[in-house]
Image (cartoon, rainbow, N blue to C red):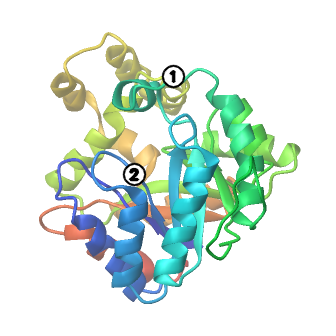
Amino acid sequence: MLTVSLGLWQDRPASDALLTARAADELGYPELWVGEMATYDAFALGTAIGLATERIALTLGPFAVAVRDPMMITMGVASVADLVRRPVNVAIGTSSPLVVEKWHGRSHAGSAKALDDHVEALRTLLDGGKSSGYHLRLDAPRSTITVAAFGPKAVQIAAKADRMVLNLITPASAARLISDFRAVGGKRVTAWVTASVLQDEAAIEQLRRGVVGYLAAPGYGEMFAEAGFGDVVAFARTRPHPRELLARIPDELLESVGLLGDSIEKRLAEYRDAGVDEIAVVPVSTADDPGGATTLRELSALGAR
C-alpha cells in the first residue's frame, strides 16, 4: 500500500505542504503523515489540512519525546481529531541531538527511556484513561501509535507500539531491521521513501539536499557505505563545506533510498520484498511540480495503493 508523507522541503514555500495534502486526498491515498520541521507546528498544520481535504486520515509526527510530553501530544492529537472530524494517529521518536539540544535547548540524553515511557503513557491517554492525574475532556481519539526507529533499542520499543516507521533507508537495511522487529513481536512497518518521477536538475538537487545531513551520521554512514558509497561517506566525515559534499553525491546514491524515474517500480518491489507493509511516498516539490502532485498522480496510476 502507498500512503503519503509531507516533504517539508527547506528550499520550497512552506505552503507547498497544503498542495501535497490536497493532491493526496484527491487521488485517494488513504493516509497522510504530517511531520514537523522548521516551519509549521504539526498540530496547526494537521488542522489546516483536515479542513482543506475531504477524507484522508492523518498521522501527526514523529514528535521528539525529549521535547513533547505525553499529555501535550495527547491534547494536540485529540484537538485536531475533534476539529477536523477525521481519524488522527500519532508518531513519536527520539529525533536528533541537533533538533533537541540546539533548537529546543533540551537534553537528548535518556531519549530511549523517554520513548519507551511515552508509548505506555500515550496508550492510556489516547484511549481516554488517566495518567499522572490528567485525562482528556475531548473525546478520546483512540489513535494508533507509531515509533520512528533505526537503532536496535528503538526497534524493540517500536514492537510495543502499533507500527514502526523507517526513514531514508535502503531495502537491504530495512530487511534487517524488520527481521529484528518481527523477532520481538512487531508487526506493521512503514517506510518513508522520497520520490520523484521528474529527473530534472531541480528535483535531483533537492534530493541531494535531503540526504546530505545523513551521510556522516552514525549508522546512516555505514548503511550508505554498505550500499557502495563508502567514498562519499568518508568525504562527508571530513566535515567539508555542504556545497562541496553536495557535488560529490551521485544519482545512484539517491536511488538507493528513493523512488526515482524509471527505477520506481523496481524499487517498490525491493521494499516490499524487504517486508515493508506500507510505503509513505515523500514527493519532491519543485517549481515544475509544486507539492509533488505529478509524482503522486503517476504513482497512483501504478495501482499499488
Q: Is residue 175 visible?
A: yes
**Front one among 137 and 230:** 137
Tag 1 secondary structure: loop
Residue 275 x, y percent position in the rendering = 71, 56
The numbered dot on residue 223 is none
Viewed as shown, does residue 28 lie left or right of 126?
left
- Most extreme residue toward the front is 133
Residue 171 x, y percent position in the rendering = 59, 47
Is the residue marked by circle 2 packed among few (<14), some (14-19), or many (20+) residues within 10 Å? some
Nearest-to-viewer mark from 1 and 2: 1
**Residue that appears at 79% across and 48% down:** 159
The correct choice, above or below, for 249 with respect to 184 in the image is above
- Most extreme residue toward the left is 287
**Residue that appears at 61% across and 37% down:** 150
Is the residue marked by circle 1 packed among few (<14), some (14-19), or many (20+) residues within 10 Å? few
Residue type (three-letter) at the residue carrying disc 1: Ser
The correct choice, above or below, for 244 with respect to 41 in the image is above
Residue 208 x, y percent position in the rendering = 28, 41
The correct choice, above or below, for 118 with respect to 189 in the image is above
Label 1 vs 2, first from the N-terminus: 2
**Residue that appears at 72% across and 59% down:** 125
The numbered dot on residue 36 is 2
Tag 2 secondary structure: loop
Quarter of the N terminus within the rendering: bottom right
The correct choice, above or below, for 232 with respect to 141 in the image is above
Quarter of the C terminus within the rendering: bottom right
**Front one among 129 and 144:** 129
Q: Name the quadrant containing residue 54.
A: bottom left
Residue type (three-letter) at the residue carrying disc 2: Glu
**Front one among 233 and 190:** 190
Distance from the alpha carbon under mark 1 to that under mark 2? 19 Å
Q: Name the quadrant containing residue 261.
A: bottom left
